[in-house]
Image: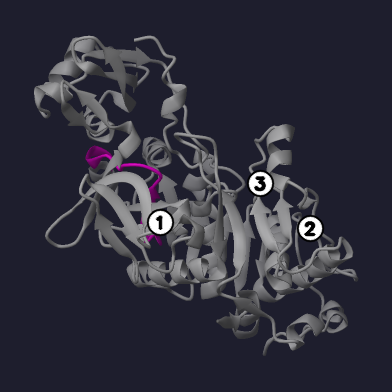
Amino acid sequence: MQVEAWLQRAAGSAPTRIALETPRARVSYRELAQLAIAGVSDLRERGVGPGDRVAIALPAGVEFAQALHACMLSGAVAVPIDLRLTPEERESIVAGGVLVDRPLRTAAAEGIQSETGLRSEAGVWSEMGIQSEAGIQSETFQEGVSHDLDAVCAVIHTSGTTSAPRPIELTYGNFLWSALGSSVALGVDPDERWLCAMPLSHVGGLSILIRSAVYATTAVIHERFETTEVLRALSQDQITLVSLVSTTLARLLDAGLRDPPALRCALTGGGPLPLALLERAHAAGVPCVATYGLTEACSQVSTGGPPLFCTRVELSEDGEILVGGPTVAPASLGPDGLLHTGDLGEIDADGFLRVNGRKADTIISGGENVAPSEVEAVLEAHPAVIEAAVLGRPDPQWGEAVVAIVVTSPDTHLEEAELREHCLSRLVPYKVPKQVQIVSGPLPRTASGKLLRRELQGISI
Protein backbone atom coordinates (compact mmCIF):
# COMPACT_ATOMS: atom_id res chain seq x y z
CA MET A 1 0.00 0.00 0.00
CA GLN A 2 1.26 3.47 -0.90
CA VAL A 3 0.64 6.57 1.24
CA GLU A 4 1.56 10.19 0.63
CA ALA A 5 5.04 11.03 1.92
CA TRP A 6 4.65 12.34 5.45
CA LEU A 7 6.88 15.37 4.97
CA GLN A 8 5.13 16.27 1.71
CA ARG A 9 1.75 16.11 3.43
CA ALA A 10 2.90 18.13 6.46
CA ALA A 11 4.58 20.79 4.31
CA GLY A 12 1.43 21.13 2.22
CA SER A 13 -1.04 21.29 5.10
CA ALA A 14 1.00 23.24 7.66
CA PRO A 15 3.91 24.93 5.82
CA THR A 16 4.66 27.53 8.48
CA ARG A 17 4.23 25.31 11.52
CA ILE A 18 7.50 24.58 13.31
CA ALA A 19 8.60 21.06 12.41
CA LEU A 20 11.75 20.93 14.45
CA GLU A 21 13.14 23.04 17.25
CA THR A 22 16.57 22.71 18.83
CA PRO A 23 18.36 25.00 21.30
CA ARG A 24 19.95 26.65 18.24
CA ALA A 25 17.34 26.58 15.48
CA ARG A 26 13.65 26.52 14.56
CA VAL A 27 12.65 25.04 11.20
CA SER A 28 9.18 25.14 9.64
CA TYR A 29 7.78 22.25 7.63
CA ARG A 30 8.28 24.27 4.47
CA GLU A 31 11.95 24.83 5.36
CA LEU A 32 12.46 21.20 6.36
CA ALA A 33 10.97 20.12 3.04
CA GLN A 34 13.41 22.33 1.15
CA LEU A 35 16.32 20.95 3.14
CA ALA A 36 15.17 17.38 2.50
CA ILE A 37 14.84 18.02 -1.25
CA ALA A 38 18.37 19.41 -1.35
CA GLY A 39 19.45 16.35 0.64
CA VAL A 40 17.88 14.02 -1.90
CA SER A 41 19.97 15.62 -4.65
CA ASP A 42 23.08 15.21 -2.52
CA LEU A 43 22.34 11.53 -1.89
CA ARG A 44 21.65 10.89 -5.57
CA GLU A 45 25.03 12.39 -6.48
CA ARG A 46 26.56 9.83 -4.10
CA GLY A 47 24.80 7.05 -5.99
CA VAL A 48 22.07 6.43 -3.41
CA GLY A 49 18.84 4.97 -4.76
CA PRO A 50 15.72 3.26 -3.40
CA GLY A 51 16.55 0.46 -0.97
CA ASP A 52 20.16 1.55 -0.45
CA ARG A 53 21.29 1.92 3.15
CA VAL A 54 22.44 5.28 4.42
CA ALA A 55 24.19 5.36 7.78
CA ILE A 56 23.48 8.68 9.53
CA ALA A 57 26.27 9.58 11.94
CA LEU A 58 25.19 13.11 12.86
CA PRO A 59 24.28 14.76 16.17
CA ALA A 60 20.59 15.03 17.01
CA GLY A 61 19.36 18.21 15.35
CA VAL A 62 18.36 19.79 12.06
CA GLU A 63 21.08 18.12 9.98
CA PHE A 64 20.06 14.69 11.28
CA ALA A 65 16.40 15.41 10.45
CA GLN A 66 17.37 16.59 6.95
CA ALA A 67 19.29 13.37 6.29
CA LEU A 68 16.46 11.22 7.68
CA HIS A 69 13.79 12.86 5.54
CA ALA A 70 16.07 12.86 2.49
CA CYS A 71 16.35 9.10 2.90
CA MET A 72 12.57 8.71 3.18
CA LEU A 73 11.89 10.94 0.16
CA SER A 74 14.40 9.02 -1.96
CA GLY A 75 13.35 5.56 -0.77
CA ALA A 76 16.72 4.89 0.86
CA VAL A 77 16.92 3.06 4.19
CA ALA A 78 18.08 5.21 7.11
CA VAL A 79 20.49 3.59 9.57
CA PRO A 80 21.02 5.93 12.55
CA ILE A 81 24.45 5.55 14.16
CA ASP A 82 25.19 6.00 17.85
CA LEU A 83 28.01 8.55 17.86
CA ARG A 84 29.59 6.96 20.92
CA LEU A 85 30.53 3.83 18.97
CA THR A 86 34.15 3.09 18.22
CA PRO A 87 35.29 3.38 14.58
CA GLU A 88 35.33 -0.42 14.35
CA GLU A 89 31.76 -0.72 15.68
CA ARG A 90 30.59 2.02 13.34
CA GLU A 91 32.20 0.34 10.34
CA SER A 92 30.44 -2.95 11.09
CA ILE A 93 27.07 -1.15 11.04
CA VAL A 94 27.77 0.83 7.87
CA ALA A 95 28.77 -2.45 6.14
CA GLY A 96 29.11 -1.17 2.58
CA GLY A 97 26.34 1.42 2.76
CA VAL A 98 26.77 5.15 2.31
CA LEU A 99 27.98 6.99 5.40
CA VAL A 100 26.65 10.48 6.09
CA ASP A 101 28.86 11.91 8.81
CA ARG A 102 28.76 15.51 7.58
CA PRO A 103 25.68 17.67 6.92
CA LEU A 104 24.11 17.20 3.51
CA ARG A 105 23.95 20.15 1.13
CA THR A 106 21.33 22.62 2.31
CA ALA A 107 20.36 24.37 -0.94
CA ALA A 108 21.60 25.54 -4.30
CA ALA A 109 20.97 29.13 -3.26
CA GLU A 110 21.61 31.53 -0.41
CA GLY A 111 19.12 32.01 2.39
CA ILE A 112 19.22 28.68 4.19
CA GLN A 113 21.71 28.59 7.02
CA SER A 114 22.86 25.79 9.29
CA GLU A 115 22.11 25.16 12.99
CA THR A 116 23.23 28.68 13.89
CA GLY A 117 19.96 30.14 12.57
CA LEU A 118 18.00 28.53 9.76
CA ARG A 119 15.91 31.02 7.83
CA SER A 120 14.24 31.43 4.47
CA GLU A 121 13.96 34.28 1.99
CA ALA A 122 11.30 34.74 -0.66
CA GLY A 123 13.67 34.37 -3.60
CA VAL A 124 14.92 31.02 -2.38
CA TRP A 125 11.48 29.39 -2.31
CA SER A 126 10.69 30.26 -5.93
CA GLU A 127 14.12 29.16 -7.10
CA MET A 128 13.69 25.80 -5.35
CA GLY A 129 10.13 25.46 -6.62
CA ILE A 130 8.58 25.92 -3.17
CA GLN A 131 5.59 28.21 -3.18
CA SER A 132 3.79 30.37 -0.63
CA GLU A 133 1.76 29.77 2.48
CA ALA A 134 -0.89 27.79 0.61
CA GLY A 135 1.30 24.78 0.06
CA ILE A 136 4.53 23.42 -1.23
CA GLN A 137 5.61 22.36 -4.66
CA SER A 138 8.90 21.24 -6.06
CA GLU A 139 10.15 19.10 -8.88
CA THR A 140 10.43 16.27 -6.40
CA PHE A 141 6.98 16.75 -4.87
CA GLN A 142 5.24 17.34 -8.20
CA GLU A 143 6.02 13.71 -8.98
CA GLY A 144 3.85 12.69 -6.01
CA VAL A 145 6.23 11.17 -3.50
CA SER A 146 4.80 8.26 -1.56
CA HIS A 147 5.88 5.69 1.00
CA ASP A 148 5.40 1.97 0.44
CA LEU A 149 4.16 0.71 3.80
CA ASP A 150 5.80 -2.67 3.23
CA ALA A 151 9.23 -1.17 2.45
CA VAL A 152 11.97 -0.86 5.05
CA CYS A 153 12.17 2.69 6.38
CA ALA A 154 14.97 2.39 8.93
CA VAL A 155 17.30 -0.10 10.55
CA ILE A 156 17.57 0.39 14.31
CA HIS A 157 19.99 -1.48 16.51
CA THR A 158 18.67 -2.85 19.81
CA SER A 159 20.10 -1.38 22.99
CA GLY A 160 22.06 -4.55 23.80
CA THR A 161 21.18 -4.92 27.49
CA THR A 162 21.71 -8.69 27.53
CA SER A 163 23.62 -9.32 24.29
CA ALA A 164 25.30 -7.53 21.39
CA PRO A 165 23.06 -4.99 19.59
CA ARG A 166 20.99 -6.53 16.77
CA PRO A 167 19.76 -4.74 13.62
CA ILE A 168 15.97 -4.50 13.36
CA GLU A 169 14.37 -3.57 10.04
CA LEU A 170 11.32 -1.37 10.63
CA THR A 171 8.95 -0.62 7.77
CA TYR A 172 7.02 2.53 6.93
CA GLY A 173 3.93 0.61 8.02
CA ASN A 174 5.48 -0.13 11.42
CA PHE A 175 6.15 3.58 12.01
CA LEU A 176 2.74 4.67 10.71
CA TRP A 177 0.78 2.22 12.88
CA SER A 178 2.94 3.12 15.88
CA ALA A 179 2.11 6.79 15.32
CA LEU A 180 -1.60 6.02 14.99
CA GLY A 181 -1.58 3.83 18.10
CA SER A 182 0.24 6.47 20.10
CA SER A 183 -2.23 9.13 18.95
CA VAL A 184 -5.18 7.02 20.14
CA ALA A 185 -3.49 6.51 23.52
CA LEU A 186 -2.38 10.11 24.07
CA GLY A 187 -4.43 12.25 21.69
CA VAL A 188 -2.90 14.77 19.29
CA ASP A 189 -3.07 18.54 19.56
CA PRO A 190 -2.05 20.58 16.47
CA ASP A 191 0.09 22.63 18.87
CA GLU A 192 1.83 19.54 20.25
CA ARG A 193 5.47 20.05 21.26
CA TRP A 194 7.11 16.69 22.01
CA LEU A 195 10.47 17.01 23.74
CA CYS A 196 13.09 14.38 22.92
CA ALA A 197 16.38 14.33 24.83
CA MET A 198 16.94 10.67 23.95
CA PRO A 199 19.35 9.32 21.31
CA LEU A 200 17.90 9.36 17.79
CA SER A 201 19.86 6.16 17.13
CA HIS A 202 17.33 4.35 19.34
CA VAL A 203 13.73 3.71 18.43
CA GLY A 204 12.30 5.76 21.31
CA GLY A 205 13.99 8.92 20.06
CA LEU A 206 13.67 8.34 16.32
CA SER A 207 9.94 7.60 16.67
CA ILE A 208 9.34 11.08 18.10
CA LEU A 209 10.89 12.67 15.02
CA ILE A 210 8.87 10.48 12.65
CA ARG A 211 5.57 10.67 14.59
CA SER A 212 5.78 14.45 14.63
CA ALA A 213 6.08 14.46 10.82
CA VAL A 214 3.09 12.11 10.54
CA TYR A 215 1.06 14.42 12.80
CA ALA A 216 2.54 17.66 11.34
CA THR A 217 3.39 18.74 14.89
CA THR A 218 6.58 20.02 16.51
CA ALA A 219 9.49 17.88 17.69
CA VAL A 220 11.76 19.64 20.19
CA ILE A 221 15.13 17.91 19.98
CA HIS A 222 18.01 18.15 22.45
CA GLU A 223 21.31 16.62 21.43
CA ARG A 224 21.64 14.88 24.79
CA PHE A 225 19.92 14.82 28.17
CA GLU A 226 21.15 17.68 30.33
CA THR A 227 19.09 18.14 33.45
CA THR A 228 19.23 21.94 33.53
CA GLU A 229 18.32 22.29 29.84
CA VAL A 230 15.42 19.83 30.01
CA LEU A 231 14.18 21.44 33.23
CA ARG A 232 14.27 24.86 31.56
CA ALA A 233 12.44 23.56 28.47
CA LEU A 234 9.69 21.94 30.53
CA SER A 235 9.27 25.12 32.53
CA GLN A 236 9.51 27.72 29.75
CA ASP A 237 9.07 26.21 26.28
CA GLN A 238 5.44 25.05 26.37
CA ILE A 239 6.40 21.36 26.12
CA THR A 240 3.27 19.20 25.98
CA LEU A 241 4.85 15.72 25.84
CA VAL A 242 8.24 14.42 26.93
CA SER A 243 9.84 10.98 26.78
CA LEU A 244 11.96 10.01 29.78
CA VAL A 245 13.38 7.01 31.63
CA SER A 246 13.21 6.51 35.38
CA THR A 247 16.69 7.87 36.01
CA THR A 248 16.12 11.08 34.02
CA LEU A 249 12.71 11.61 35.66
CA ALA A 250 14.37 11.27 39.07
CA ARG A 251 17.08 13.77 38.12
CA LEU A 252 14.48 16.32 37.03
CA LEU A 253 12.52 15.92 40.27
CA ASP A 254 15.75 16.25 42.27
CA ALA A 255 16.47 19.47 40.35
CA GLY A 256 13.13 20.94 41.35
CA LEU A 257 10.73 20.09 38.50
CA ARG A 258 7.25 21.00 39.62
CA ASP A 259 3.98 21.75 37.82
CA PRO A 260 5.33 22.14 34.25
CA PRO A 261 2.79 24.57 32.76
CA ALA A 262 1.92 22.92 29.42
CA LEU A 263 2.90 19.28 30.00
CA ARG A 264 0.13 16.78 29.25
CA CYS A 265 2.16 13.64 29.81
CA ALA A 266 5.66 12.46 30.66
CA LEU A 267 6.04 9.03 29.10
CA THR A 268 8.50 7.00 31.16
CA GLY A 269 9.93 3.80 29.71
CA GLY A 270 13.19 1.96 29.22
CA GLY A 271 12.47 -0.20 32.27
CA PRO A 272 10.11 -0.48 35.24
CA LEU A 273 8.82 2.75 36.76
CA PRO A 274 9.12 2.39 40.56
CA LEU A 275 5.87 3.14 42.38
CA ALA A 276 7.66 5.50 44.77
CA LEU A 277 9.01 7.52 41.83
CA LEU A 278 5.58 7.63 40.18
CA GLU A 279 4.00 8.88 43.41
CA ARG A 280 6.75 11.46 43.77
CA ALA A 281 6.14 12.71 40.22
CA HIS A 282 2.41 13.04 40.77
CA ALA A 283 2.99 14.90 44.05
CA ALA A 284 5.15 17.37 42.07
CA GLY A 285 2.39 17.93 39.54
CA VAL A 286 4.15 15.97 36.80
CA PRO A 287 1.59 13.86 34.84
CA CYS A 288 3.64 10.70 34.43
CA VAL A 289 2.63 7.50 32.62
CA ALA A 290 4.59 4.26 32.43
CA THR A 291 5.08 2.99 28.89
CA TYR A 292 6.42 -0.36 27.73
CA GLY A 293 7.96 -0.93 24.34
CA LEU A 294 10.88 -2.37 22.43
CA THR A 295 12.71 -1.88 19.16
CA GLU A 296 11.10 -4.86 17.46
CA ALA A 297 7.65 -3.34 18.06
CA CYS A 298 8.66 0.13 16.81
CA SER A 299 8.67 1.66 20.30
CA GLN A 300 5.42 1.64 22.31
CA VAL A 301 3.51 -1.57 23.04
CA SER A 302 1.43 -0.32 25.94
CA THR A 303 1.01 3.09 27.52
CA GLY A 304 -0.51 3.42 30.95
CA GLY A 305 -1.34 -0.29 30.91
CA PRO A 306 -3.55 -0.99 27.88
CA PRO A 307 -1.94 -2.17 24.64
CA LEU A 308 -1.76 0.35 21.82
CA PHE A 309 -4.53 0.50 19.24
CA CYS A 310 -4.33 -2.56 16.94
CA THR A 311 -1.57 -4.09 19.08
CA ARG A 312 -2.21 -7.59 20.35
CA VAL A 313 -0.63 -8.68 23.64
CA GLU A 314 -0.72 -12.22 25.04
CA LEU A 315 1.18 -14.21 27.64
CA SER A 316 2.79 -17.59 27.05
CA GLU A 317 2.39 -20.39 29.57
CA ASP A 318 5.54 -19.26 31.39
CA GLY A 319 4.44 -15.61 31.45
CA GLU A 320 6.45 -14.30 28.49
CA ILE A 321 4.91 -11.25 26.79
CA LEU A 322 3.94 -11.97 23.18
CA VAL A 323 3.12 -9.10 20.83
CA GLY A 324 1.38 -9.08 17.46
CA GLY A 325 0.03 -6.44 15.12
CA PRO A 326 1.20 -4.01 12.45
CA THR A 327 3.86 -2.30 14.59
CA VAL A 328 5.98 -5.45 14.84
CA ALA A 329 9.00 -5.73 12.51
CA PRO A 330 8.15 -8.51 10.02
CA ALA A 331 11.46 -10.33 10.52
CA SER A 332 10.92 -10.41 14.31
CA LEU A 333 7.73 -12.48 14.13
CA GLY A 334 7.95 -16.10 15.23
CA PRO A 335 6.30 -19.06 13.46
CA ASP A 336 3.14 -18.33 15.47
CA GLY A 337 2.96 -14.81 14.01
CA LEU A 338 3.92 -13.17 17.32
CA LEU A 339 6.96 -11.38 18.68
CA HIS A 340 8.44 -13.30 21.61
CA THR A 341 9.73 -10.36 23.64
CA GLY A 342 11.77 -12.18 26.26
CA ASP A 343 9.98 -10.05 28.87
CA LEU A 344 7.76 -11.43 31.62
CA GLY A 345 4.45 -9.88 32.53
CA GLU A 346 0.91 -10.14 33.85
CA ILE A 347 -2.41 -9.03 32.38
CA ASP A 348 -5.09 -8.04 34.87
CA ALA A 349 -8.85 -8.38 34.58
CA ASP A 350 -9.09 -5.00 32.80
CA GLY A 351 -6.55 -6.03 30.16
CA PHE A 352 -3.78 -3.86 31.60
CA LEU A 353 -0.24 -5.14 31.09
CA ARG A 354 2.27 -5.19 33.93
CA VAL A 355 5.90 -5.94 33.05
CA ASN A 356 7.91 -7.95 35.58
CA GLY A 357 11.32 -7.93 33.92
CA ARG A 358 13.40 -9.98 31.50
CA LYS A 359 12.84 -13.71 31.24
CA ALA A 360 16.61 -14.22 30.95
CA ASP A 361 17.13 -12.21 34.16
CA THR A 362 14.88 -14.44 36.28
CA ILE A 363 16.71 -15.75 39.34
CA ILE A 364 15.90 -19.28 40.49
CA SER A 365 16.72 -19.38 44.19
CA GLY A 366 15.90 -22.55 46.12
CA GLY A 367 13.52 -23.57 43.33
CA GLU A 368 11.58 -20.28 43.48
CA ASN A 369 11.49 -17.70 40.66
CA VAL A 370 12.55 -14.17 41.57
CA ALA A 371 12.02 -11.22 39.19
CA PRO A 372 14.90 -8.75 39.74
CA SER A 373 12.72 -5.78 38.77
CA GLU A 374 10.31 -6.51 41.64
CA VAL A 375 13.11 -6.50 44.22
CA GLU A 376 14.69 -3.42 42.62
CA ALA A 377 11.39 -1.54 42.92
CA VAL A 378 11.24 -2.34 46.65
CA LEU A 379 14.84 -1.25 47.21
CA GLU A 380 14.30 1.99 45.26
CA ALA A 381 11.26 2.76 47.42
CA HIS A 382 13.65 3.34 50.35
CA PRO A 383 14.12 7.13 50.64
CA ALA A 384 17.92 6.86 50.77
CA VAL A 385 18.23 4.70 47.63
CA ILE A 386 18.78 6.35 44.23
CA GLU A 387 18.93 3.19 42.12
CA ALA A 388 19.38 -0.54 42.54
CA ALA A 389 20.32 -3.62 40.54
CA VAL A 390 19.45 -7.18 41.57
CA LEU A 391 21.35 -10.19 40.26
CA GLY A 392 21.62 -13.92 40.79
CA ARG A 393 24.98 -15.31 41.90
CA PRO A 394 25.92 -19.03 41.97
CA ASP A 395 25.35 -20.45 45.45
CA PRO A 396 25.96 -24.03 46.66
CA GLN A 397 22.91 -23.97 48.93
CA TRP A 398 20.33 -22.04 46.86
CA GLY A 399 21.54 -22.67 43.32
CA GLU A 400 21.37 -18.91 42.84
CA ALA A 401 21.45 -16.35 45.61
CA VAL A 402 19.65 -13.03 45.26
CA VAL A 403 22.15 -10.19 45.66
CA ALA A 404 21.79 -6.44 45.20
CA ILE A 405 23.96 -3.49 44.22
CA VAL A 406 22.59 -0.22 45.52
CA VAL A 407 23.44 3.45 44.96
CA THR A 408 22.45 5.68 47.89
CA SER A 409 22.11 9.42 48.33
CA PRO A 410 25.49 11.07 48.98
CA ASP A 411 24.58 12.52 52.38
CA THR A 412 23.05 9.40 53.88
CA HIS A 413 24.54 6.53 55.88
CA LEU A 414 22.77 3.26 55.24
CA GLU A 415 23.62 -0.18 56.54
CA GLU A 416 23.08 -3.41 54.64
CA ALA A 417 20.99 -4.80 57.50
CA GLU A 418 18.59 -1.86 57.29
CA LEU A 419 18.01 -2.46 53.57
CA ARG A 420 17.41 -6.16 54.13
CA GLU A 421 14.88 -5.37 56.87
CA HIS A 422 13.19 -2.90 54.50
CA CYS A 423 12.88 -5.64 51.87
CA LEU A 424 11.67 -8.22 54.39
CA SER A 425 8.76 -5.93 55.30
CA ARG A 426 7.52 -6.01 51.69
CA LEU A 427 8.77 -9.27 50.15
CA VAL A 428 8.60 -12.97 50.93
CA PRO A 429 11.89 -14.12 52.48
CA TYR A 430 13.25 -15.95 49.41
CA LYS A 431 13.14 -12.68 47.41
CA VAL A 432 15.11 -10.68 49.99
CA PRO A 433 18.74 -10.16 48.90
CA LYS A 434 21.19 -12.37 50.75
CA GLN A 435 23.79 -9.64 50.32
CA VAL A 436 23.67 -5.94 49.50
CA GLN A 437 26.65 -3.98 48.16
CA ILE A 438 26.39 -0.19 48.52
CA VAL A 439 28.34 1.65 45.79
CA SER A 440 28.88 5.28 44.83
CA GLY A 441 27.35 4.74 41.38
CA PRO A 442 25.89 5.46 38.96
CA LEU A 443 25.00 2.01 37.66
CA PRO A 444 25.86 1.25 34.03
CA ARG A 445 23.00 1.92 31.65
CA THR A 446 22.39 2.14 27.93
CA ALA A 447 21.75 5.49 26.26
CA SER A 448 18.03 4.75 26.52
CA GLY A 449 18.30 4.21 30.29
CA LYS A 450 18.15 0.42 30.49
CA LEU A 451 20.27 -1.30 33.11
CA LEU A 452 23.30 -3.13 31.69
CA ARG A 453 23.23 -6.20 33.93
CA ARG A 454 26.02 -7.96 32.10
CA GLU A 455 28.43 -5.21 33.15
CA LEU A 456 27.52 -5.76 36.80
CA GLN A 457 28.47 -9.41 36.92
CA GLY A 458 32.10 -8.59 37.69
CA ILE A 459 31.32 -6.50 40.80
CA SER A 460 32.40 -8.34 43.93
CA ILE A 461 29.65 -8.83 46.50
Position of residue 73 measured from the top left corner of the image (x, y, whole percent): 70, 72
Label 2 Cα crowd, 10 Å radius (few <14 / some 14-19 / many 20+) = some
Image quadrant containing the C terminus: top left
- The amino acid marked with disc number 3 is Ile
Q: Provide the secondary structure element on which disc 3 rests.
A: loop
> Residue tagged by mark 1?
334
Q: Earlier in the sequence, mark 2 or mark 3?
A: 3
Residue at mark 2 to residue at mark 3: CA–CA distance: 21 Å
* Residue 13: image location, x then y, percent: 60, 84
- The residue located at (49%, 60%) in the rendering is 329
Find disc 2 in the rendering and name its residue: 114
Residue 44 appears anywhere in the view = yes
Please state, as top left, top right, bottom left or bottom right, where the N terminus lies in the image. Answer: bottom right
| Bounds of the magenta segment | 260-277
Viewer-proximal residue among 244 and 314: 314
Left of 48 or right of it: where is 153?
left
The chosen color scheme is one colour
Instruction: Indicate whether residue 11 is drawn in magenta.
Output: no
Q: Nearer the viewer, residue 149 or 440?
A: 149
Q: Badge 1, how many Cα within 10 Å: few under 14, some, many 20+?
A: few
Instruction: Identify residue type, mark 1.
Output: Gly
Residue 377 horizontal/vertical position (percent): 25, 34
Q: Secondary structure at mark 2?
A: loop
Q: Residue at x 43, y 40 (%)?
A: 248
**Residue that label 3 marks:** 81
Residue most extreme to the bottom: 134
